[in-house]
Image: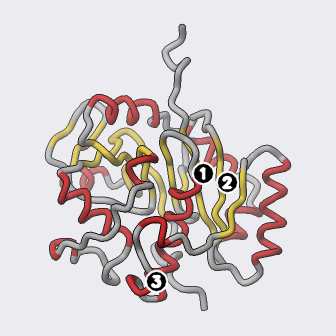
Amino acid sequence: MTLFQHRSKVTFATSCWERDWRTVLLDPEYLKVRQIGNHQYPFFERLLIINNVDDPALVERIAQEKVEQGLLTRVVLARDVLSYFGLQRSDFNEWQYYNALAPLMAIYEARGDYLLYLTGDVSLRKPVQWIDKAIRFMQKRARIKVANLTWNDNYPEAKKESTRTTWNFYVAEQGFSDQMFLVKTADFQAPIYGEIRADGAHYPRGDVLEKRIFSYMKNRGWARITYRRGSYTHEDGNFFQRKS
């Protein structure tokens, strides 16, 4: 029996919108290598969420070619699933709504035991084998609910935000980013998005999805781990503003 013979079923999901769908779908290496392959994990399924594009039919047609090639498993057009999570449209302004829609769709659609989600402007410049390590860490420690790579090679910041360091991870008592998250699917398919903490004001643009998850996690004592031996690259922090 090999070490990884019984690997967990992990759904990979990313998203695209009007300002990044060409990079995600037309660059031959971006989705295939930098978003999927460099994680070095045999994903159970690979999803693309199409969110807030000018020509959904065109983007869906191009994305379906990736399904035919075997790179993607499914392509999903974003739709309003707020009620499933105990939310309503009035909980968000327009920017917050579109910002939340893609990750919520990925969570809603995921069929794996775990979900790895990254926004369309997030990728890995080089391979990092980290998912098995993160899942084993979470399975042994019930309060660890979120895992991610270090962001933009900023290891000093990730360490500063943590309360302790293990061989592979920085462990933080609070924090969540929708740029990349690895979670147990069932935990996040629950209606956990209705709580708002005043000390989440460091999240910009009001009561965004990140702030809601941060609040629920902190209220329950959930913690986060950041892999300290590999990083993702976030190309553009403004990708998820409303398209003009």
**Above or below: residue 150 compared with residue 176:** above
Front of the two marks 2 and 3: 3
Q: Residue at x 74, y 62 (%)?
A: 25
Residue labelled with disc 2: 31
Question: Residue 220's quadrant in the figure?
Answer: bottom left
Badge 2 vs badge 1, beta-carbon distance below 8 Å:
yes
Q: Residue flagged by tag 2: what amino acid is it? A: Leu
The image shows residue 66, relative to residue 50, as above or below, that is above
Of the image marks 2 and 3, the number of the one nearer the N terminus? 2
Mark 1–mark 3 Cα distance, whole angstroms, equals 31 Å
Query: Label 3 belongs to which residue?
Result: 89
Distance CA(mark 2)–CA(mark 1): 5 Å
CB-based contact (under 8 Å), mark 2 and mark 3: no
Front residue (pair 138, 233): 138
Q: Residues within 10 Å of mark 3 (few under 14, many from 20)?
A: few
Q: Residues within 10 Å of mark 2 (few under 14, many from 20)?
A: many
Taking depth in this image into account, of 67 and 235 the one nearest to the observer is: 67
Task: Find residue 32 and report its horizontal and vertical position in percent.
Answer: 69, 48
